[in-house]
Image (spheres, helix red, strand yellow):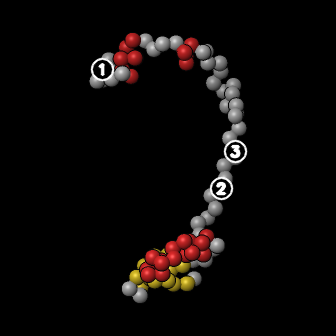
Amino acid sequence: MSAVTMHDVDVDLPALVDRAHAGEEIILAKAGKPYAKLGPIEAVSAQPPRTPGRLKGLVGHIPDSVWFDPLPDGELDLWEGKHKHYP
């Protein structure tokens, strides 16, 4: 663990971040007193890659009319902001 001054942080923050990423813990000092700590974070567990169609079959068949039929007039009015609250 090493200590650096705030001036060092202003001058060379990218290098300090690289050192922290490499595993070093760095104490940031202000007015000669420890002020904050810069260090590595634990690796975030990687999520498995997305697989297209993984949820296929869970919902069942959705008819095309759900996506392509025009909205009923009342619902269309709501989307267009013609009513302030739901009827």
Amino acid, disc 3: Pro
Instruction: Tell me what residue is drawn at x 37 percent, y 14 percent.
Output: 74
Residue 62 lies in what quarter of the image?
A: top right
Q: CA distance from mark 3 to mark 2?
A: 12 Å
Residue for badge 2: 45
Residue for badge 3: 49
Labels 1 and 3 touching (C-beta < 8 A):
no
Tell which tag, 3 or 2, sits nearer the viewer.
Answer: 3
Whether residue 28 is visible to the viewer of this picture, yes or no, is: no
Going from N to C along the chain, the mark reached first, 1 or 3, is 3
Viewport quadrant of the C terminus = top left
Q: Position of residue 30 (x, y in %)?
A: 40, 82
Element class at badge 1: loop
Residue for badge 1: 83
Crowding at dot 2, Cα within 10 Å, few <14 / some 14-19 / many 20+, comes out as few
Instruction: Tell me what residue is drawn at x 61 percent, y 15 percent.
Output: 63
Q: Is residue 10 above or below residue 81?
A: below
Q: Position of residue 19 (x, y in %)?
A: 60, 75
Amino acid, disc 1: His
Tell which tag, 1 or 2, sits nearer the viewer.
Answer: 1
Q: Position of residue 80 (x, y in %)?
A: 36, 21
Instruction: Tell me what residue is drawn at x 63 percent, y 74 percent.
Output: 23
Element class at badge 2: loop
- The number of discs equals 3
Instruction: Tell me what residue is drawn at x 54 percent, y 15 percent.
Output: 68
Q: CA distance from mark 1 to mark 2?
A: 46 Å
Residue 43 lies in what quarter of the image?
A: bottom right
Q: Nearer the viewer, residue 12 or 77?
A: 12
Amino acid, disc 2: Ser
Going from N to C along the chain, the mark reached first, 1 or 2, is 2
